[in-house]
Amino acid sequence: MEEIRKHNKRGLLGAFLIAIGVILLLGNLGYLPYEVTDVIFRWPMIFVAIGIFNLIKKEYTAAIITLSIGGFYLLPHLIDGVSYKDVFKFWPVFIILIGLAFYFKRRDMKPMMRTSGSTDDYIDEVDIFGGGVTQVESKNFRGGKITAIFGGGEVYMDRCQLSPEGAILDVAMVFGGTKIIVPRDWTVKTEVVSIFGGFADKRNFFSEGGSDPSKTIIIKGTAVFGGGEIRSI
């Protein structure tokens, strides 16, 4: 499974580099007008590219966030007579899109993904303009989703046990952050894209055995002007 994941990543990176190379070549040969290449190679396209990758990986909340940021800064260059002031009038649309992503994501979740109890195999934590502490005590933890927007919280997993297949945790942090506490012997693989933020594993390994590869949790998602950290107690 891990080899397939790595293979897919290499494929996406290869396709992205090929596309960049083709665009550069067409621009140098004069087949693309300057107006097109000028827009494509502006810094907001970084957000657009990350958003497209998130769409491919079906991380729709992160995709909406990054595509909205990129689109905000690109629109004045795409439409004549449109200024940043004009675009800013529509900033509530950004909140609407995020709300729609949460709504449809919730409808698509499996029935077992409840948030009322700490013994669930899946979690769905949302911290908006606030925060809290969550204790996960599942005996077959399989992952879930953590969202922090202008807020944050702490998720303690030191009392839970991973499923034999491991767990996958999706995180989306915008001007917020989350601290995740895991057992010392867990193997944590982070695949979080950070934009003006960060996500770090700050655990101290004192045990001689180190982490156990059979207990693996994958944390992926996006941190925009926010971040998170992994610790052990």
Image: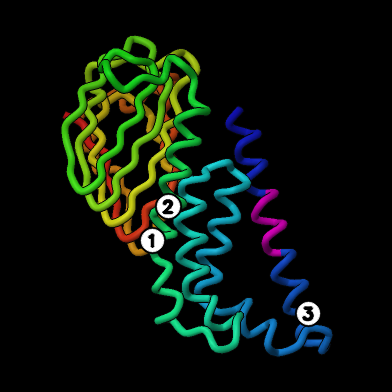
Question: Residue 45 placed where, x, y %?
Answer: 56, 70
Q: Judge left or right: residue 41 versus residue 123.
A: right
For the residue labelled by badge 2, is the local secondary structure a helix, a strand or a loop?
Answer: helix
Q: Secondary structure at mark 3?
A: helix
Q: Which mark identifies residue 92?
A: 1
x, y percent for residue 138: 31, 13
Mark 2 and mark 3: Cα distance apart in space: 39 Å
How far is the residue under mark 2 from the one under mark 1? Answer: 6 Å
State the quadrant of the N terminus.
top right
- How crowded pointer 2 is (Cα within 10 Å; few <14, some 14-19, many 20+) is rated as few
Which of the 4 image quadrants contains residue 114?
A: top left
User: Is 10 colored magenta in this rendering?
Assistant: no
Whether label 1 touches label 3, CB < 8 Å: no
Query: Where does the magenta region start and end?
Result: 11-17
Question: Which three-letter amino acid code belongs to the residue tagged 3?
Answer: Leu
Who's the residue at 82% across and 89% down the image?
30
Q: What residue is disc 3 on?
A: 25
For residue 26, side relative to residue 137 (left or right): right
Q: Earlier in the sequence, mark 2 or mark 3?
A: 3
Cβ atoms at labels 2 and 1 below 8 Å apart? yes
Task: Estimate the spatial distance between the alpha carbons at disc 1 and disc 3, rounded to whole Å.
Answer: 39 Å
- The disc, 1 or 3, on the residue closer to the chain's N-terminal end is 3
Closer to the eye: label 2 or 3: 2
Amino acid type assigned to the residue bearing label 1 in the image: Pro
